[in-house]
Image (cartoon, grey):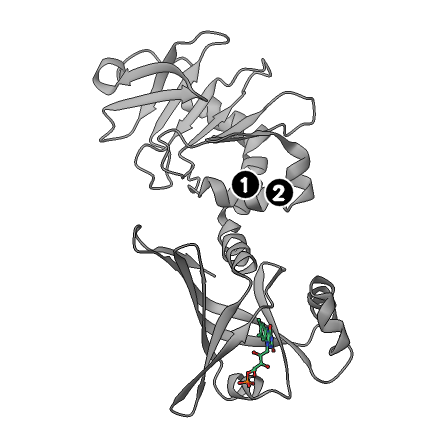
Amino acid sequence: MNWTTGNLRRAKLRIMSDPELKGMLVRSGWNEIVFDLDGDGAADVSFLDENGDGNIDTVAIDMTGSGEFNLYLHDSDDNGIPDTILWADDGAPELEVLAMGEGVERGLIKVGAKVYSRLIAEDFLNDEVHVSLGEMSDYLKSNLSELIEEVQKVIDSAGIEKVAYFIENAETYYLATVDGDQPRVRPFGTILVYDGKLYIQTGKSKDVSKQIAANPKVELCAFKEGVWLRVAGELVNDDSKDVKMTMLDKYPALQNMYSAEDDNTQVLYFKDATATFSSFTAQPEIIKL
Ligand SMILES: Cc1cc2nc3c(=O)[nH]c(=O)nc-3n(C[C@H](O)[C@H](O)[C@H](O)COP(=O)(O)O)c2cc1C
């Protein structure tokens, strides 16, 4: 099984904008996102940031319907593959190790702020297996794996939301185009996530639009509170009326100048783009769009 780690904050932003996922949310704490997948009022699965680095590293699952999480899939090295599988008896704070990947010597297993168990691999590796891995994976396959995958997909797509959210808060970004051998730049503000893609809006009569038609490579830059974001990639024209209407709904002031039916309004989305968040204090964060 391979579940991809994701950034917890981005996942929360994405979940908040998705009514279906939001409906399944039990709570969203500083280091966890907890879902009730079957709507029975009890938590079924929790995505946790155990080591507090902002990334999800553990999926905790209630396998028995007891209301307690009893299966923990833990990715101790943040590589997207769980290397520690832990099973806890109902109600018992002790966790038994079912499997542990190479290089894991110690795992500190917590739920919220509560430390449940400290594990030292050598002591537990050959211990009796409480539930076979086969049984567990069968259970996951038939019960929860699809839903976990669904949630995971959402987490994976959360990067684009972070980019749009940052631009919305910065309010103005600067869009650079290429005009022959001359770079051109101007302020822009429109940004929209639609159908998993990042869109901007302009008018076909503008020079900026003509430059993009001749050479779709662009880069934008936005800055807020010590962090700057650059998105570099190609823009693709999209003549769909739906996305134009959604864009104009989002920016009602544009409706004085543009409509989804005119020949001028243009929306374009980023293709093969790289978004980079930079600051003087942290390592750059790169998100592929
Ligand atoms: C804050 C701000 C936001 C703007 N946002 C947009 C935008 O989203 N789309 C757009 O086409 N023009 C926008 N404009 C206007 C463009 O900057 C302006 O039309 C510019 O001249 C277009 O570039 P060009 O002259 O190279 O065609 C904005 C202007 C300002 C001041």
Q: Give the total of numbered labels.
A: 2
Q: Is residue 29 visible?
A: yes
Residue under label 2 = 16
Q: Does the rendering let one see residue 259?
A: no
Mark on residue 150? none
Position of residue 201 measured from the top left corner of the image (x, y, whole percent): 62, 73
Q: Is residue 51 above or below residue 182?
A: above
Most extreme residue toward the bottom is: 180
Seen at 43% across and 24% down, the residue is 72
Which quadrant does the N terminus fall into? top left
Q: How dense is the environment of label 1, judged by Cα within 10 Å: few (below 14), some, or many (20 and up)?
A: some
* In contact (CB < 8 Å): disc 1 and disc 2: yes
Q: Residues within 10 Å of mark 2 (few under 14, many from 20)?
A: some
* 102 and 76: which is toward the camera: 76
Image coordinates for residue 174, horizontal then vertical, percent: 48, 72
Residue 173 appears at what percent x and percent y?
A: 50, 68
Indicate the amino acid at tag 2.
Met
Kind of residue indicated by mark 1: Lys
Residue at coordinates 46% horizontally, 10% vertically from top-left?
89
Circle 2 SS class: helix
Task: Write down the residue under mark 1.
Answer: 12
